[in-house]
């Protein structure tokens, strides 16, 4: 992103000097469908981000401009409501949530640009929300806690964008740290940083460029299976409140004979929570190979047991699984499309992407997206 260019466009549009804020997109190294089961996740912020320029106005008006959409949107801080411009809602929703928490601020000029691919599962939406929250906080000196910036973003996504999301994406965007993965306990909201030394390897995201429409209903069904499993375990173990509290012996005892579908879904979540803890240990020991193996196991579980993969994602993982230069690969995110995340030996990457692009096109008639990413710091002011 050319920041000088962003600044001069802001000046040309608003005749004012902007405060600039950056908030990154994110990957999730391991820990899928664990957040809503009180488990752990292990995201990292990446070097693709949303950039916001902001300045105060003398009136109460809110003037937004999106470089990606080449659209403007005008409203007022005295009457914040949903806009017809979908992109503007992620911004206005955050302003609304900040007001609802009792903070006061006046009108502002706002310019947004970024290089997080939209809808690819890198959470451009959370990056927009966190950039907006922090920009308003810094411009008006509101002193909002960083965790609250993430929570405000999550709430805005739920209310103005209508997506019932967990906290992982906003958390990762705000708290990311270069060369580190972030391990978050979704029950206590405690977190820690784990060094991510890739020594000669890189993280590569392969974008299927598909999003199968099944995803919303399947997501709700998976959540219902997890809840049903917990309810049956609870009949014998009263203290249990989520799958986080359940081990395989308890599940075998209480669910196996009752319902195969519920059993298989719960088994995946229990295994995935355990796998993430193993992965954290392996990472701390710098054992990338072992981490990669665990990622492949996660994919296997997501595909065969949790059943949230699709032909395109399975194809991409199957293609790279036998290769020595690929340590790990799995689908990332909710499922039914989006990206796979891969750990690939650096010098082999260009050739491999070329080959996979060809194979993917032959198989599905679709263009493969590929992004080599590095980990990066979370939300900050950049000038
Ligand atoms: P993702 O997986 O990328 O978060 P979502 O569908 O949740 O996908 O969010 C994408 C939406 O976020 C876009 O449709 C747009 O409304 C908003 N958005 C993302 N990036 C930008 C940007 N650079 N400028 C304006 N709005 C953006
Ligand atoms: Mg999103």
Image: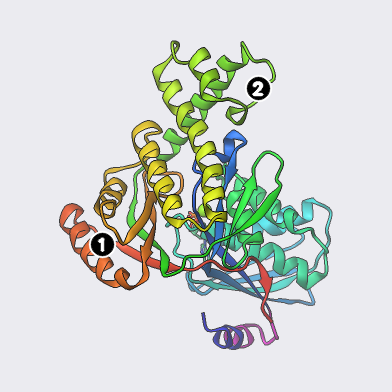
In space, the residues marked 2 and 1 are separated at their CA atoms by 46 Å
Q: Nearer the viewer, residue 130 or 179?
A: 179
Q: Is residue 226 above or below residue 81?
A: above
Q: Residue at x 55, y 18 (%)?
A: 250
Q: Identify the image quadrant of residue 202.
A: bottom left
Q: Nearer the viewer, residue 383 or 291?
A: 291
Q: Identify the image quadrant of residue 179.
A: bottom right
Q: Is residue 367 visible?
A: yes
Q: Identify the image quadrant of residue 44.
A: bottom right
Relative to 306, 164 lies left or right: right
Q: Residue at x 52, y 58 (%)?
A: 286
Q: Which portion, as a residue range, is magenta?
A: 9-19
Q: Which residue is mark 2?
A: 240
Q: Is residue 31 above or below residue 14?
A: above
Relative to 308, 139 lies left or right: right
Q: Is residue 99 above or below residue 377?
A: above
Q: Which residue is mark 1?
A: 367
Q: Quadrant of the C terminus?
A: bottom right
The image position of residue 167, as x and y in percent, is 62, 47
Q: Residue at x 68, y 38 (%)?
A: 187
Relative to 322, 124 lies left or right: right
């Amino acid at each position: 992103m050319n920041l000088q260019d962003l600044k001069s466009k802001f000046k040309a549009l608003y005749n004012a000097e902007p405060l600039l804020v950056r908030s990154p997109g994110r990957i999730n190294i391991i820990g899928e469908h664990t957040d809503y089961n009180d488990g752990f996740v292990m995201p990292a912020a990446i070097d693709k981000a949303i950039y916001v320029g902001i300045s105060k106005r003398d009136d109460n008006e809110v003037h937004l401009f999106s470089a990606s959409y080449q659209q403007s949107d005008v409203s007022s801080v005295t009457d914040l409501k949903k806009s017809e411009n979908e992109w503007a809602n992620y911004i206005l929703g955050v302003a609304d949530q900040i007001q609802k928490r009792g903070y006061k601020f006046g009108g502002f000029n706002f310019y947004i640009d970024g290089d997080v691919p939209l809808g690819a599962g890198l959470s451009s939406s959370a990056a927009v929300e966190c950039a907006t929250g922090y920009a308003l906080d810094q411009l008006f000196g509101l002193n909002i806690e960083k965790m609250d910036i993430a929570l405000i973003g999550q709430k805005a996504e739920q209310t103005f964008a209508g997506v019932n999301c967990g906290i992982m994406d906003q958390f990762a965007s705000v708290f990311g740290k270069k060369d580190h993965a972030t391990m978050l306990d979704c029950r206590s909201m405690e977190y820690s940083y784990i060094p991510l030394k890739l020594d000669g390897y890189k993280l590569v995201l392969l974008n299927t460029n598909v999003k199968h429409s099944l995803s919303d209903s399947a997501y709700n069904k998976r959540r219902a299976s997890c809840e049903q499993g917990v309810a049956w375990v609870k009949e014998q173990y009263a203290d249990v409140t989520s799958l986080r509290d359940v081990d395989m012996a308890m599940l075998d005892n209480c669910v196996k004979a009752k319902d195969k579908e519920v059993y298989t879904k719960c088994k995946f979540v229990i295994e995935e929570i355990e796998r993430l803890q193993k992965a954290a240990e392996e990472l701390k020991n710098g054992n990338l190979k072992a981490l990669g193996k665990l990622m492949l196991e996660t994919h296997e579980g997501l595909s065969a047991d949790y059943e949230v993969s699709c032909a395109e994602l399975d194809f991409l993982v199957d293609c790279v699984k036998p290769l020595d230069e690929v340590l790990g690969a799995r689908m990332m995110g909710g499922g039914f499309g989006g990206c796979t995340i891969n750990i690939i030996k650096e010098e082999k990457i260009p050739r491999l992407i070329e080959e996979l692009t060809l194979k993917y096109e032959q198989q599905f008639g679709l263009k493969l997206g590929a992004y080599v990413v590095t980990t990066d710091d979370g939300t900050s002011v950049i000038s």
